Image (spheres, grey):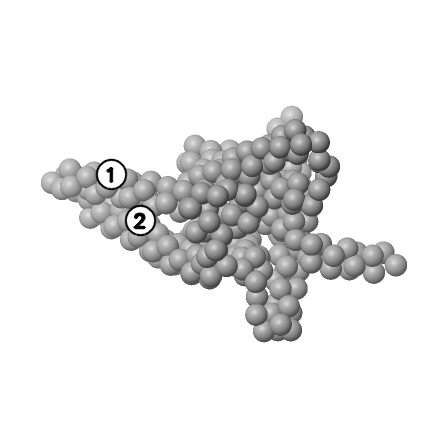
Amino acid sequence: MQAQSGDMLSTKFIVTLAAIADFVFCGLLSNGFITAVIIMEWATNRSLAACEQLLLSLGVSNIFATFVLSMGLYNWNTNTIFSNALILLVFYSFCYVFLSIRYWLTAWLCVFYCVKILNSTHSFFLWWRMRISRLVPRLILGSCVISFLISFFLALTVSIRLQSNKTANIRNITEVEKMQELSKNANIFFVIIGSTCPLLVVFFCSILVVVSLCRHACKMMSEGSNFRDHQTEAHVKAARSVLSLLVLYISFYVAQTLSSLEEFQKNLISFLMCFIVMLIYAPVQAAILVLSNPKLKQIASRMLSRAKS
């Protein structure tokens, strides 16, 4: 019985690793497609629209995030790549940088969709609509700066905690406990800025887009107009894209939170399932971006038709 249970566990582990390898390949391929198409567009037109800048940044960040997540999983399984604690700390700092950048870029893409689709006459939305195209490069740069700062302070607090553990003794145990408590609070604060704040932005944009769609639909029905006009279809596409990104974001957020818990890491299968959810993010987000962008969707359809023929 023990041998059979061990064989079943090893079989599940192999199947899980195969699924992970598949998702890694799909994430790199799909986001590589987005990146290549937009770079060729950039080389042809010598300029990029604001939406294309966000898509390019998301494609590149997804590629790097998939790579570092795969490296982290392999090191967790074998413990052969990063044997030095300092190197491991630097690696996970860069891992958090790419994940945080991806969070914020997703939030700004939802803001872009929201601002472009809403028909509000409020001065706040009018200000954003007039300036969103010029603000996108600054928002992308700001996301990178914020993510690097958060990662730097996270690495600093973790290194202080490691150093305090090394120098702990009976006389300074109170100071060590205070330092550890301070570092934990700092980690929570920086994780909130890097993960939770973008999630709230995506959630707020989702509510605004859905409310705007409902109001527009009610107005069209009361006027007896054609419900399937161009503006309504744009509303539906924007709402579908933002809600899809919100659901994907929440699933990734929950999986990342669970995988960081020490109690959850002791269960091999549960931890790997969380990692699969985290790896699914890149290919699924790429599919959402392709389906919501007419140019990418057209090129992808053309390539698929050629592959079939």
Location of residue 140 in the rendering, given as x and y in whole percent from the top left corner: 46, 58
Q: Residue at x 71, y 31 (%)?
A: 224
User: Which labelled disc corresponds to residue 206?
Assistant: none
Q: CA distance from mark 1 to mark 2?
A: 11 Å
Q: Nearer the viewer, residue 225 or 75?
A: 225
Please name the amino acid that badge 2 sits on.
Val
- The residue at the far left in this view is 171
User: Which labelled disc corresponds to residue 158?
Assistant: 2
Location of the N terminus (image quadrant)? top right
Q: Nearer the viewer, residue 210 or 221?
A: 221
Please name the amino acid that badge 1 sits on.
Glu
Residue that numbered label 1 is attached to: 181
Q: Residue at x 11, y 40 (%)?
A: 171
Q: Residue at x 64, y 37 (%)?
A: 12
In the rendered image, which quarter is residue 34 located in? bottom right
Left or right: 59 with respect to 182? right
Asked if residue 32 is positioned above or below residue 234 in the image, the reply reads: below
The answer to whether one can see residue 13 in this image is no
Location of residue 240 in the rendering, given as x and y in whole percent from the top left corner: 63, 40
